[in-house]
Structures are given as C-alpha cells and as structure tokens.
Amino acid sequence: MIVYNVQRRFFELKNDAEEYRRSQNLPPAATHKITIINRNNLAEFLNAMSEGKPAMALQGVEPMPIADDAYDFIPDFIKRDWQERRRFRKAGAS
C-alpha cells in the first residue's frame, strides 16, 4: 500500500497530495511517499504516529524476504540486484 503525506494530511493519490502541497505554498520535499508492504510496517508506522514521530519513520525499511518456494521463479538479474543491495546495506551498517 502506498499513501502520500503532506504535513498532517494523508492522500491516496500523489496528484492530490501535490495539489494540497502547492495550495499551502510548501516545497516539493514536503510531500512524503509512505510504502507499507506488510503488517510489521503498518505496526511500525502506527507506533511512530502515536509517539509523535514524523511519517518518515518508515524510510529504510527492509524489503520483505523472498519466500524460498518463489525464488526459482524470480529472474536472475533481480536476484543479483537484491543480493547486492543487501550486501551494500550490511556494509553500510557496520
């Protein structure tokens, strides 16, 4: 699920969020895209909201792991890219 946030307002569509942002004379960086890919992300997002943290609390959330049984159906170039991104994240974390 993707929603867009501008200040304290949430929008289903990016165009609506951008229109609101412009009506409030805010810079483009005021529009935030929030992606929720699973229940854990949703719980993190709701916890952050209830603690008064900005909606950007979801930035950098790890992608969902690939299920073992689905792995054979994913093209090799996507697998390599995914593995490289994981390596890069781990190297940056240490």
Image: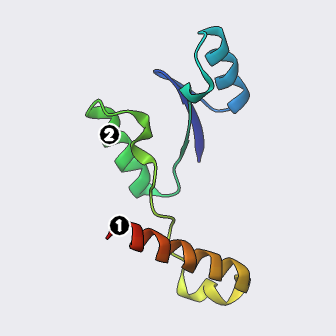
Secondary structure type for disc 2: helix
Q: Mark 2 points at which residue?
A: 48
Q: Name the residue under label 1.
A: 93
- Rendered location of residue 75, percent (x, y): 74, 83
Q: Quadrant of residue 13?
A: top right
Secondary structure type for disc 1: helix
Residue situated in front as seen by the camera: 39 or 87: 87
State how many labels appear. 2
Q: Residue at x 59, y 48 (%)?
A: 1
Q: Which amino acid does label 1 sit on?
A: Ala
Instruction: Give the numbered dot on residue 4.
Output: none
Residue situated in front as seen by the camera: 69 or 18: 18
Q: Residue at x 73, y 27 (%)?
A: 15
> Reading the chain from its start, which is encountered first: label 1 or label 2?
2
Is residue 89 placed above or below 35 in the rendered structure?
Answer: below
- Rendered location of residue 55, percent (x, y): 42, 35
- Rendered location of residue 65, percent (x, y): 50, 74
